[in-house]
Image (cartoon, coloured by chain):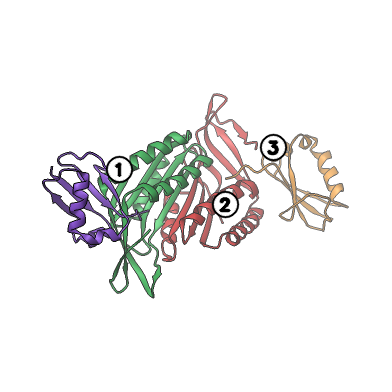
Chain colours: A red, B orange, C green, D purple
């Protein structure tokens, strides 16, 4: 798990993909990218999200999540989570999950599971910044 | 005991701070009452509490210099 | 759907990701990458796979698949399939599926479904090239 | 009728070719018999047949210049 200041760049994403490809036992990569949506909230567009994290606990919980998924699926080769902190504009990427496995079934299932666990277990909060610079903490 | 308390998400606005240091704390309940006295508005929000990065449900034993975190529902991902 | 001669480069993949990010209604991208595995077959490693395709029919079937997935999931914004033809070495990528949606649930489900439909419906065949240059058509 | 026949996958090895042009074909069954006569080994393989990019299950009506494809199980993806 890595916490990135600001948006996750396409360069960082392709670096992850290239690195995943160096293992010739891999047959399948499943990726999830979360992107900041230009939602309309009470007539105003979201122009950015500011993420804050309890970083030490995020790292600890992420380790638990990664271990539990690794032990649940026996075909996995590697797991990677990147999450932004700080300001990420609408249209930019704030979450990358990549699961590499020997075969497609487990890559896809494990990636879907990781995304849910990230939402559920990692102490990260988002505040929406609207186009008029007003702010709104996202409630669950 | 001395206890470091962290506030996250919307609770940083309710308390006006991200971090507050408490001295002379006798127990977890004692800490919770002190925090409620300092920031009465906090009772209007849902939150979970972690001690040293672990979520606690009952009243745990606190030790000197423990870190206590007040965390609203997670909204990351 | 695009059929690519040879492996799908990391540059092509990141281009797809960057393009997907230009739509600010998007909240989630689910990607699947299929990679040629260095399998061991009767004591010999696979060094490459040669793909052949009935291209005209691939394009026609891909259109049907994309339409049916688009109509099954109402939150989808875009779908993309890239598949190699010709020689792809072990460790290289031969399939890219990318689904962009407003939210994660449908992005993930639609991507998994597309991968299965691609395997099932597209007239593409692979021949494994082993390290001693012997060849073996993959049987289902 | 003149019919273009395509062979794919392992069938290109069984037949030694990717494409064969047939003339004087009277019907779909006629074509199938001609192909079986030319390449008896083909009967040892599983395959499906497409006419003009559509998989056919029963005996379809062929038209002049139709494209008929012999396709072993798909293994792409």
Q: Secondary structure at mark 3?
A: helix
Q: Is residue A123 visible?
A: no
- Alpha carbon of mark 2 to alpha carbon of mark 1: how far? 46 Å
C113 vs B16, nearest the viewer: C113
In the rendering, at what x and y percent does residue A43 appear? 54, 24
In the rendering, at what x and y percent does residue D77 appear? 37, 53
Q: Secondary structure at mark 2?
A: helix
Residue furthest top as drawn: A43
- Alpha carbon of mark 1 to alpha carbon of mark 3: how far? 71 Å
C35 vs A55, nearest the viewer: C35
Circle 2 chain: A
Q: Residue placed at 52% from the left, 62% from the top?
A: A75
Which of labels 2 and 1 is toward the front? 1
Circle 3 chain: B
Disc 2 designates what residue? A114
Crowdedness of circle 3 by 10 Å Cα count: few (<14), some, many (20+)?
few
Q: Quadrant of residue D55?
A: top left
The numbered dot on residue D58 is 1
Q: Residue placed at 55% from the left, 39% from the top?
A: A49
Q: Is residue C122 visible?
A: yes
């Amino acid at each position: 798990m890595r916490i990135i200041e600001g948006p996750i760049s396409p360069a960082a994403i392709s670096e992850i993909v290239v690195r995943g490809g160096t293992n010739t036992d891999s047959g399948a990569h499943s990726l999830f990218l979360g992107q900041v949506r230009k939602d309309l909230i009470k007539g105003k567009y979201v122009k950015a999200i500011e993420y804050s994290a309890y970083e030490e606990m995020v790292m600890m919980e992420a380790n638990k999540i990664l271990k539990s998924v690794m032990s649940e699926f026996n075909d996995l080769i590697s797991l990677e989570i990147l999450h932004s902190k700080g300001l990420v504009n609408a249209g930019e990427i704030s979450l990358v999950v990549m699961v590499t496995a020997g075969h497609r079934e487990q890559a896809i299932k494990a990636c879907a599971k990781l995304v849910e666990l990230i939402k559920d277990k990692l102490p990260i909060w988002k505040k929406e910044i609207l186009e008029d610079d007003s702010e709104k903490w996202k409630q669950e | 005991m001395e206890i470091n308390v962290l506030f996250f998400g919307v609770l940083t606005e309710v308390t006006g701070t991200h971090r507050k240091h408490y001295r002379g704390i006798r127990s977890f309940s004692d800490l919770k009452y002190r925090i409620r006295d300092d920031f009465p508005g906090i009772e209007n929000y849902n939150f979970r509490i972690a001690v040293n990065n672990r979520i606690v449900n009952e009243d745990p034993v606190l030790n000197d210099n423990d870190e206590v975190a007040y965390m609203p529902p997670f909204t990351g991902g």
